[in-house]
Image (tube, grey):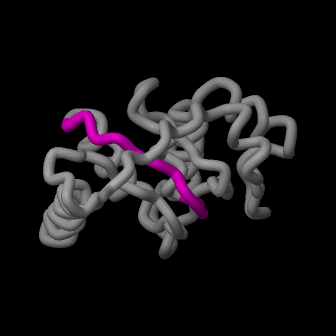
Amino acid sequence: MLKRIVLFLLAFVTAASLSAPGHADDRTIYIRHDRGGDVGLYQIKAQVARELKLNVVIDGLCASACTLLVGLPKGQVCATDRARLHFHRARLARPMKNGRALLRRTNADILSSYPAGIRRWITRHGGLGDRMLKMEPADVARYLPPCPPAPMLF
């Protein structure tokens, strides 16, 4: 598991440094089609982005565990007019002892990591459950700041 986390973080930080060709100092991650995955890994990813002050541009689908990135501090995350967020409750990959209690805590942690407006939107749409809640670009724009225009490259 440790090897998987280290490789995941290395890929994440490398992507940040290579995300904008010609701009080695640009510390921006572009999310264009991220279907999520392991909540623990995305919690680490969000913490690394927070500590390294990486910017996250949501420019397409950010689903499931990927949505943990919207909880980054103000100024570190923005959304384009193509951003879509998809939410659902956490699930266990396999049964485990105390699994229900772990899921309760994990889902509470996930929900509390989101900005207040997104939490209210999720609650109004039935809360985190098995059904995927799909926040389309118009709603995303209400809760996340717009991204500044990209620099012109000549």
Vertically, is 112 above or below 88? above
The picture places residue 109, in percent across and down from the top left corner, at 51, 37
Left or right for 132, reference 48: right
**Does the magenta run of residues contain 58?**
yes
Is residue 142 placed above or below 34 in the rendered structure? above
Q: Residue at x 70, y 27 (%)?
A: 117
Extent of the magenta region: 52-64
**Count of labels in the image:** 0
Residue found at the far front of this picture: 154
- Foreground residue, 62 or 82? 82
**Residue sitting at x 77%, y 42%:** 139
**Can residue 38 be seen in the rendering of this structure?**
yes
Which of the image's four quarters has the N terminus?
bottom left
Residue at left offset 39%, top offset 33%: 76
Residue 96 image offset from top left, x and y in percent: 46, 66
Q: Quadrant of the C terminus?
A: bottom left
Q: Is residue 74 left or right of residue 50?
A: right
Q: Looking at the image, is 34 positioned above or below residue 45?
A: below
Q: Residue 115: within the magenta?
A: no
Quarter where residue 83 is shown: bottom right
Q: Nearer the viewer, residue 113 or 97?
A: 113
The residue positioned 79% from the left and 63% from the top of the image is 131
Who is closer to the viewer here, 131 or 16?
16
Q: Residue furthest bottom?
A: 94
- On the image, the x and y values in percent for residue 38 come to 42, 64
Q: Main SS of the magenta segment? A: strand
Residue 102, can we see it? no
Question: Residue 12 at what x, y percent from top left?
Answer: 25, 60
